[in-house]
Amino acid sequence: MNKAKGLFKEFQEFAVRGSVVDLAVGVIVGAAFGKIVESLVKDIVMPLINFLVGGSVDFTNKFLVLSRPASYSGPETYAELSRAGATVFAWGSFLTIVINFILLAFVIFWMVKVINTTRKRLDMEKAAPPVPENIQLLREIRDALIKKQ
């Protein structure tokens, strides 16, 4: 019983330790951020690219049939051929995933760049040294003299 209490206490210390909690928060926030970026690429960037290109940038139904079952006479789609047990070289699906990855990486790059620029700007504002009292007093005198004129 005493060993169980000791083990429970050790587990509690491990689970509540800052790094484990930070990791859990990072995973949860990362998953949510991943959904945001995925939606940004799928729902905003890809439709714009499709519009600019004048068609769909979706190659998922581009494939090469290497072998098919002898008795198969159904539709010539990737899903149906795969279901029937055909050997399909699905180069289009791979190409679509690569294109989506490149777009996703590009969007994440720009998001991180904007965040870093904003952070630097905020850090510079925070890091600005306070104006010395004598300089502040001289500025107030200058402003008062300008108002008198």
Image (tube, grey):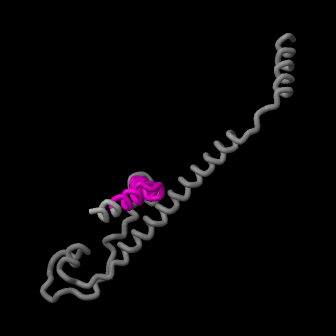
Looking at the picture, tell me which residue is in the foreground, 25 or 49. 25
Quarter of the image for the N terminus: give it. Answer: bottom left
Extent of the magenta region: 8-32
Quick check: is 74 in the magenta stretch? no
Q: Main secondary structure of the magenta part?
A: helix
Query: In the image, is residue 22 above or below residue 89?
Result: above
Counting every numbered tag in the picture gives: 0
Q: Is residue 65 above or below residue 53?
A: below
Q: Measured from the top left, where is residue 57 in percent x and y?
A: 40, 64
Q: Is residue 47 visible?
A: no
Residue in the image at 17% along x and 87% along y? 69
Residue 132 is at least partly visible in this image: yes
Q: Residue at x 47, y 54 (%)?
A: 18
In the visual, does 47 lie left or right of 61?
Answer: right
User: Horizontal placement of 54 versus 67: left or right?
Assistant: right
Q: Residue sitting at 45 percent across and 67 percent down? A: 99
Residue 63 picture quarter: bottom left
Q: Residue 88 appears in which quarter of the rendering?
A: bottom left
Tell me which residue sits at (42%, 53%) in the image: 25
Is residue 19 a member of the stretch shown in magenta?
Answer: yes
Residue 112 place in picture, x, y as percent = 55, 54
Closer to the camera in the image, 53 or 136: 136
Residue 96 in percent (x, y) is at: 39, 69
Picture quadrant of residue 35: bottom left
The x, y position of residue 140, in whole percent, is 82, 20
